[in-house]
Image (spheres, helix red, strand yellow):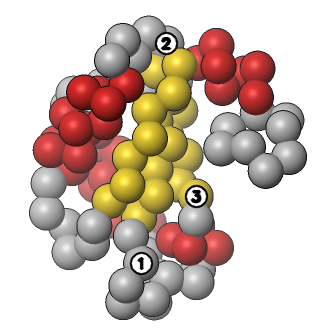
């Protein structure tokens, strides 16, 4: 089970209705092509100044809406992403 480019494009389009991220990163089983029926789609949304990251995550999940898959959306500040992107095992 895998997601296609059309679905990825639609996810990004919906995110852009509520956010202007510097990056949207697909990770986890959807990124590796190892999704199963029980998998969710993991997204890291990197924003310059996300403020309350939990609220931002909820807003983004609501904007994505129902697309046939559950979503796990993590929001991270660009500065934090840059600090941690080379950490092995880190989220960035």
The part of the image, by quadrant, that contains residue 86 is: top right
Quadrant containing the N terminus is: bottom left
Of the two numbered discs 3 and 2 on the same chain, state the one appearing first in sequence.
3
Depth check, front residue: 35 or 7: 35
Rounded to the nearest whole Å, what is the CA distance between mark 3 and mark 2? 20 Å
Ranked by sequence position, the earlier of labels 3 and 1 is: 3
Q: Secondary structure at mark 1?
A: loop
Q: Nearer the viewer, mark 3 or mark 1?
A: 1
Q: Using the image, tell me which numbered label, if any, was put on residue 48.
A: 2
Locate residue 84, reporting x and y percent: 76, 28
Residue 45: give x, y in percent of width and height. Answer: 46, 36
Horizontally, residue 32 falls left or right of residue 49, namely: right
Cα–Cα gap, marks 3 and 1: 12 Å
User: What residue did someone put label 1 on?
Assistant: 39
Q: Position of residue 38 (x, y in %)?
A: 37, 85
Structural crowding at the residue carrying mark 1, measured as other residues with C-alpha within 10 Å and reported as few (<14), some (14–19) or many (≥20): some
Which residue is at 84% across, 38% downward? 87
Please give the residue where the numbered disc 3 appears in the rendered image: 27
Residue in view at x 32 percent, y 30 percent:
54
Say which residue appears at 67% left-offset and 38% top-offset: 92
Earlier residue among tags 2 and 1 = 1
- Is 9 located above or below residue 55 in the figure? below
Image depth: mark 2 or mark 1 in front: 1
Badge 3 element: strand
The numbered mark at residue 78 is: none
Q: Contact (CB < 8 A) between labels 2 and 1?
A: no
Which structural element holds mark 2?
Answer: loop
Q: Can residue 70 be seen by looking at this rendering?
A: yes
């Amino acid at each position: 089970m895998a997601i296609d480019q059309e679905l990825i494009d639609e996810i990004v389009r919906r995110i852009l209705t509520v956010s202007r991220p510097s990056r949207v990163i697909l990770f986890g089983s959807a990124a590796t092509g190892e999704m199963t029926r029980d998998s969710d789609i993991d997204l890291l949304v990197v924003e310059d100044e996300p403020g309350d990251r939990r609220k931002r995550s909820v807003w983004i999940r609501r904007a994505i809406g129902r697309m046939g898959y559950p979503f796990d959306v993590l929001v991270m500040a660009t500065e934090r992403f840059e600090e941690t992107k080379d950490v092995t095992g880190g989220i960035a």
